[in-house]
Amino acid sequence: MVPLNHYLVLSGVLFAIGTAGVFLRRNLITVLLSVEIMLNAVNLTFVAVGRYRGTVDGQIITFFVMTVAAAEAAVGLALVISLFRHRETLNPDAFTALKW
Amino acid sequence: MEILAFYAFAAITVIASLLVVGQGNPMHSVMLLIVSFGALAGLYVLLDAPFTAVTQIIVYAGAIMVLFLFVVMLLNVPREEAVAPAISALLGPTGMRLGVVLSVLLAVEVVWALSRVGIGWFTQGTSAASVSSVALIGNSLFTRHAFAFEATSVLILVAMVGAVVLAGRERH
């Protein structure tokens, strides 16, 4: 059986990749995709730890995270569409009206 | 055998995720993310969680990614302006350089912390009983977590109304 640490390190790496995407990309859609990578890294941790503890709680919380991710994607993409209508761009640096 | 499968799926996931972040076309990013989620579903099967694996494929790769694809096609912006690939980002403006440094720092920190986690931290050892039963999940979901389950349905309703209000055209 694969040791638990392997799964935890893999999910740590995935989470860091997602963070890098949020920091580096200049496209709102790719930023949202990076957030999905981060959510999946956390899901992997939940399922792995739940498996090694011998309970189903990890899988249940993963189920809820997936539901919240679906809601987040729907609202986030609606915001992206409405921002694109205002500015004709997806560059987050273009939306600075609230910045002083 | 199992460890080989783990490394194969892990490599696919990491490489696909890196490409999602590293290349400029959002369309390709969505496709690569579907590949990454497929490999993650394989990891869930290795973890004895077939229900989660199937949910991952149906909900993530099926529903959420189709939503992303629709928006990418609808907005029709194949390239971002002033494409900044991940490699040259190190030489980019201060904000980007800081972002790279922060993410590398986070990666080192998280991997260091997680690699120290031992199985002794948890009550049961590696011989923990198999928990792949869907009946067990359903039982726990509809008894112990019934309130959270109902609250989720309200959340979905709110998200649906919010998305329609935000993305719908204003009528005058």
Image (tube, coloured by chain):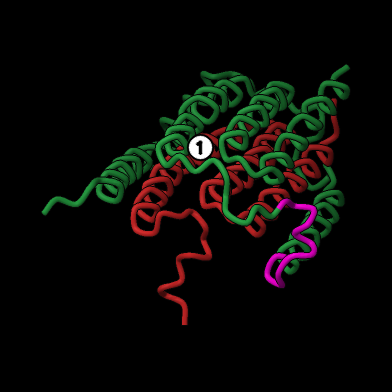
Chain colours: A red, B green
Q: Quadrant of residue B144?
A: top left
Q: Residue at x 19, y 52 (%)?
A: B170
Task: Answer with left or right where residue B4 lies relative to residue B40.
Answer: right
Q: Quadrant of residue A98?
A: bottom left
Residue at disc 1, secondary structure: helix
Quick one: B1 or B80, which is closer to the camera? B80
Quick one: B143 or B54, which is closer to the camera? B54
The percent position of residue B172, horizontal first and vertical second, equals 11, 54
Q: Judge whether B107 appears above or below B143 on screen.
A: below
Q: Residue at x 48, y 33 (%)?
A: B69
The percent position of residue A52, horizontal first and vertical second, equals 74, 34
Q: Residue at x 23, y 47 (%)?
A: B169
Amino acid on which the number 1 mark rests in the picture:
Met
What's drawn in magenta, residue-wise?
Answer: B85-96
Task: Answer with left or right where residue A64 lies relative to residue B165.
Answer: right
Asked if residue B94 is among those painted magenta in the image, a careful observer would answer yes
Task: Name the subunit of mark 1.
Answer: A
Q: Residue at x 69, y 41 (%)?
A: A45
